[in-house]
Amino acid sequence: MNTEIKERLEKTLEKYGISKAKASREMGKSNAVLSAYTTGNYQGDIPKLEEAILRWCARQDQAHSRKRVPIVETQTLKTITRAIELAHTEHDIALIIADAGSGKTTGARWYADQNESTVIYIPVISGMNRRMLVTELAKKCGIETARVQFNTLVQATADALAGRDSLVILDEADYLKADALEFVRRIVYDLGESGLVLIGLPRLRGMIQNLRSDHRQLESRIGISVDVDGLSKADAAMIARAVWPDCPKEVVNAIQDIAGKDTRQFCKIIERMQNTMAVNKLTEPSVDVAEVASQLVLRRRNG
């Protein structure tokens, strides 16, 4: 046994507050194997195990060396949360349209977390029909759904929503089946007397305004409509400087030249830059670091 490796393992566990059980899982080993190693009783392939330990320790140092990109109150976030807040306060329907990576999910989750007692947040799955939607709403309201007739479930869910200051947020609502898109207006807004937020890609507006789908009842009730343009230069600088307070303008511009208006990709590049800086023992971000960190990034066509 290499005592230096054993000491490094113990220091890493203590430094980051990680249990042996969690560490062993992340190494792909059993808890018994790691316990036997630390007590000097392991009878297996010690060099192979120590290689796994060193790799795991290195990953922990790298992961903990970077500062997570925080949620920053950018103009985009304010726009999204303001629309959601209006729908909540006025019991209205809001339509929020944004491209992928614009921060719409971050804004919706942030608002839901701040108002968890009254907001129901549902990330829509592809092909969700009205029965699936009502069942999910009912579960979120604490209603038993097993062996309950659909009409009974609809009424119970609507009553539960109407009984409190509710808001329902459907993220990626463009994945709803046509019957569910129309029915959610009926159960949440009409019967449930609650606010409703529909968030999705630009195709969601097309789905609602498609005359063949006959969503005129829904379209006529949408009182708030917001188009989110994506990451602005001001928002980009705000996010970067939440991680590096003195981040130079040219570094922010270099990252945004790669990410375009995609907030999600902008944040991923920042996190990868921190990894690159940790490996190379750098303390300040630079344009070169941004370029290195973005080498494996799929560049958006419409930056």
Image (spheres, grey):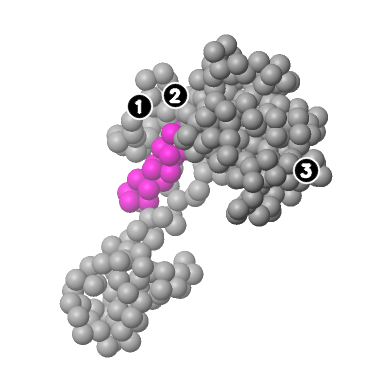
Q: For this rendering, which residue is in front, 18 or 81? A: 81
* 18 vs 11, nearest the viewer: 18
**Residue 104 spot, x, y in % from top left:** 57, 32
The amino acid on which the numbered mark 3 sits, given as a three-letter code, is Asp
- Residue in view at x 62 percent, y 26 percent: 182
Residue at mark 3: 159
Callouts 3 and 1 close, C-beta under 8 Å: no
Camera-side residue of 122 and 40: 122
Q: Distance between the residues labelled 3 and 2?
A: 45 Å
Mark 3 and mark 2 in contact? Answer it, CB < 8 Å: no
Identify the mark at residue 260; answer none if there is no mark: 2
Range drawn in magenta: 265-280
At label 1, the amino acid type is Arg
Q: Which of marks 3 and 1 is nearer the N terminus?
A: 3
Label 1: element kind: loop
Q: Is residue 150 visible?
A: yes
Residue highlighted by disc 1 = 299
Marks 1 and 2 in Cβ contact (< 8 Å): yes
Q: How far apart are marks 3 and 1 (CA)?
A: 47 Å
Q: Is residue 301 magenta?
A: no
Label 2: element kind: loop
Q: Taking 218 as reference, is 103 left or right?
A: left
Residue plotted at (68% across, 40% down) = 151
